[in-house]
Image (cartoon, rainbow, N blue to C red):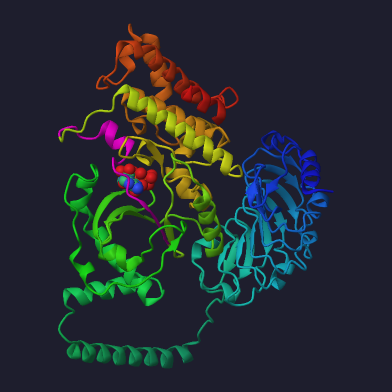
Amino acid sequence: ESEADILIKFKESLKNSGALSNWNNQKPPCSGDQENWVGIFCEAGAVWGLQLQNMGLEGTIDLDSLTKLPHLRTMSFMFNNFDGPIPELARLSGLKTVYLSNNMFSGEIPPETFIGMTGLKKLHLANNKFSGQIPISLLDLPKLMELMLENNEFEGEIPQFPPDRIKRLNVSNNRLVGEIPHSLSNFTTSIFDGNTDLCGAPLKSCTTPNKLSPGTIIPVAILVAAALAALVVVVVILRKRQQAPLGPGEAAAASASATAPAYGKAEQKAYVELDKMEQGRAAATSRAVAPGTTSPEKPSHAKKSEPNVKITFLKEERDKFDMSDLLRASAEVLGSGVFGSTYKAALGDGQMMVVKRFKHMNNVNKEEFHEHMRRLGRLSHPNLLPIVGFYYRKEEKLLVADFVENGSLAVQLHGNRSRGRPCPNWPTRLKIIKGVAKGLLYLYNELPSLTAPNGHLKSSNVLLDRSFNPVLTDYGLVPVVNQEHAQEHMICYKSTEYKQTGRITKKTDVWTLGILILEVLTGRFPSNFLQQGRSNDTDMATWVESVIRDEASNMDIFDANMERAKQCESEMMKLLKIGLDCCQADVDSRPDIKEADEDSGG
Ligand SMILES: Nc1ncnc2c1ncn2[C@@H]1O[C@H](COP(=O)(O)OP(=O)(O)OP(=O)(O)O)[C@@H](O)[C@H]1O
């Protein structure tokens, strides 16, 4: 059986598998490293991963088929409607990561479920209805480092995991009781929240204090008093000996090293430098609204010896530089977005780079992050801003890209005009929309396994080059962004379908394109309409529809500052209709990305 036949058989075992419509024999699942089918990962022509998330899938997971995929290492079925008992995962002993969270699995997990899964690193079972004991076979998995079991009905005691093995854990909101194993005592209390009767570090101690007889109370009290007196003496002596307070530089260094996590000295120093740059942001941010309108500023502290931290380059042909070059460069803070701050750096050799500092990525490990960046690094399209390089650290990541001359579409549409910036005219706006649609279509073709291959399309993420050609930035990041943060801030999570069903779909980016079209045509800022979680609010599309319906002249909806010729008005009206079409609340009636591209490009 070919991998295609195996996967098609697997698909047939699923209910509601409409999202897998391109799983057919027209193309093989993989061509080399390239995925031709949605929801799979390929390497050297073989399937190594399944990522069937958020697709409304139902039924049971047919392991018989999956056991025939010898290279399968990761599978995710999160955010679907699978139910029944946990699949017999040990039949897929080569798996490294298993994500089954946010389904309706239920019942006890047999103790032997994980026997032999010696490569398993991550197991996510959260938000299901699993009950019974946490399976004991998890203790024998030498590589298990991430275990997410929250919001189930697990009961009994937490098994004695060996020390230093589990790095990420959540068992909150179950029915666990008894003493927390010592090996887990360093975790924060919140991961144990919501259990009936857990005790021991980091929660309150399990032992109730022994009742002391009057005979023992007196000597204990004397001992305590003596210890307190000794402590007071020591404090007084230390105070007297204390030197003059730290100078400002030392104080800053001390506070930085107190907050900076334990990393290599060079890395730590680099981040301290970035923090300092960011602290100088207040002055720079107002200028950053209109990039390039002021002379760049250079942080004075960057003149000292800079740390040498290597950036991983994704484009071989690029002239290389490292963190010290970036810190030595003239720098300007362009702004702070929802993920972190963005800086512009003018390197000594004339290259103008932009460094984006992400603080809200999820806990993907280094290997996975590198893998995802390499995937994004392979993309190449005139309407995408390439990621030149990146730097990984657990808590935050840096992405480096080229500076794009004319800044963002948001600034061009809504920025201050007092500096003589012309308002984009109709032909320019049309060219921008066509380019954006082309970029989106390319992303859909190249990243078919992502539900929202862009995920964050908005006017500040559409940059304009010297000739006002649009290039998209901040695309393809949904898989590496912290879920909670993504839901709160990323534009795809503000779509009608997300508000109504809590899911994003393959057509969610089409909705973001629709909103962008309406913004470009009306000159109105969509965030004034889009308030996440307030599903009864008028969104931009509803507002546009009501104006068209009520106003005497439909032309009043268009940005009054947009220069246009009379004969273009029918074209503008046509694009407005396409925008509204893309924003249809009913996902099925909405065009797909290919139709949207054909409509707006035609
Ligand atoms: N490569 C670039 N060239 C020129 N300007 C850029 C570049 N990347 C980002 N910018 C601009 O810098 C500013 C800050 O960007 P940043 O991405 O931090 O915030 P944002 O786009 O407003 O929000 P988000 O974090 O949601 O993407 C924005 O005005 C953005 O358009």
Relative to residue 13, is residue 404 drawn left or right? left
- Residues drawn in magenta: 396-418
Quarter residue 413 falls in:
top left
Residue 88: x and y in percent read: 79, 56
Q: Is residue 499 visible?
A: no
- In the image, 495 versus 294, the foreground residue is 294
- The x and y percentages for residue 28 are 73, 43
- Examine the rendered structure and indicate whether residue 505 appears above or below residue 232: above
Q: Does residue 253 appear to the left or right of 35 in the view shown?
A: left
Measured along the vertical axis of the image, is residue 53 above or below residue 321? above
Asked whether the viewer can see residue 211, the reply is yes
Picture coordinates of residue 69 (x, y %)? 77, 54
Q: Nearer the viewer, residue 495 or 161?
A: 495
User: Residue 140 lies in what quarter of the image?
Assistant: bottom right
Give coordinates of residue 77: x percent, y percent: 67, 48
| Total labels drawn | 0
Name the residue at 67% across, 70% down: 159
Residue 463 lies in the magenta-colored region: no
Residue at the extreme top of the image, as rendered: 552
